[in-house]
Image (spheres, rainbow, N blue to C red):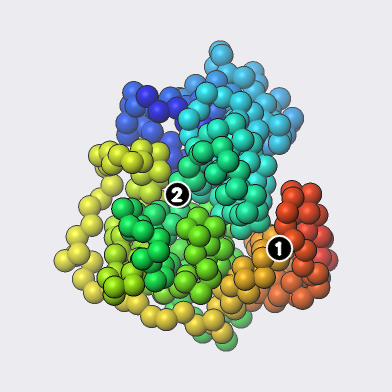
Amino acid sequence: MKRISVIGSTGSIGTQTLDVLKQHPGQFSVEGLAAGRNIELFLEQVRLFKPRKASVADKDAADSLRPFLPAGVELFYGEEGLNEVAAGTDADTVVTAIVGSAGLPSTLAAIDAGKHIALANKETLVTAGQLVTELARKKGVSLLPVDSEHAAIFQCLNGERLSDVERIVLTASGGSFRHLNREQLQQVTVEDALKHPNWSMGAKITIDSATMVNKGLEVMEAHWLFGMDFEQIGVLLHPESIVHSFVEYRDGSVIAQLGNPDMRVPIQYALTYPERWPSETKRLSLSEAGQLHFREMDLERYPCLRMAYECGKLGGTAPSVYNAANEVAVARFLNGEIPFLRIESLIEETLSRHTNHSADDLDTIFAADRWAREIASTI
């Protein structure tokens, strides 16, 4: 039986992870669950899976949940709670599905405790890639990608030598506004932005998909996951989201991973690797899919992707500032404070004020994160 903990269980990835576990009764035990403030859904999950440890965002949420918990469930809250669920159980694998840089400390705690990581939190590698990968190597744990693009690359590299890889290419759907030009983007609304044409995701990631920040974070994540230079990482627009990503080898061969847009497939593979278990997902029919379309990425149309490449090559604290400024900008857009295109310029203005430092320790990374949030909140 595989023992699992899930950080961010009420979010999009978290709920789909638990869907996967329900498809395989008796094959998984849930050792820990952590969520934020969606207490009603979280209580349903805790009652169904009966984890040994559970955690919520803060003391108020914990107090409202405690009277209804099943017997035997130990309740925590805050950062201590995340760390308990990540590192303080008998889980073999921890699914890190919390959105944003808040997932970094608990991921590091899980790695330090010798847990394998099913990684769905991009910001962990974006902000602290060197620290995370070095600790994983030291502890002998696996970083198994859950993002569909990185899971695809991971599968395309199976059995191959990295020295034979010419480049990897991440595909991008283009998000909610892929059919609009820059002038048309000036009029879009929050409601428009949240209508992703292919994937079911949380609000923040859906906005990131529309700005292409999501793909920029994935480029930086791929750099650390696969040890690729940024010049070896390409991005291609692919509206159908059937080809999840591909690898080009030096002999001219291209190996791609295809499937219907369903996050439960890469989630399950990360939990069962190196085995492939049966899945209830709809099978891909290429005859039904018909034509597949691809086009080069326009960095003028998507300046956030250009900035991501620039920050990734700079290294140091630049990726942390990029990520933090974006989190603030997206929150301000969702709250109706700024228009959609202001997300881009707010990130760029924050970066322009930043003095880059080496990201050798968590204190430096967190200081850069706090500085960026303050600047992005007040511009």
Q: Is residue 235 left or right of residue 75?
A: left
Q: Is residue 314 visible?
A: yes
Task: Relative to 44, say whether 351 is above or below.
Answer: below
- In terms of secondary structure, where does tag 2 sit? loop
- Label 2: how many Cα within 10 Å (few below 14, some 14–19, many 20+): many
Is 317 placed above or below 177 here?
Answer: above
Instruction: Determine the residue positioned at 40% across, 43% down.
Output: 270
Residue 199 shows in this picture? no
x and y percentages locating residue 23 in the rendered image: 32, 34
Residue in front for this viewpoint, 222 or 50: 222
Residue 146, which numbered label?
2
Q: Is residue 207 above or below residue 54?
A: below
Please, what secondary structure does the residue beneath circle 1 have?
loop
The C terminus lies in quadrant: bottom right
Label located before the other in sequence (2 or 1)? 2
Residue lying at the far front of the rendered structure: 163
Which residue is at the front of the view, 45 or 370?
370
Residue under label 1: 316
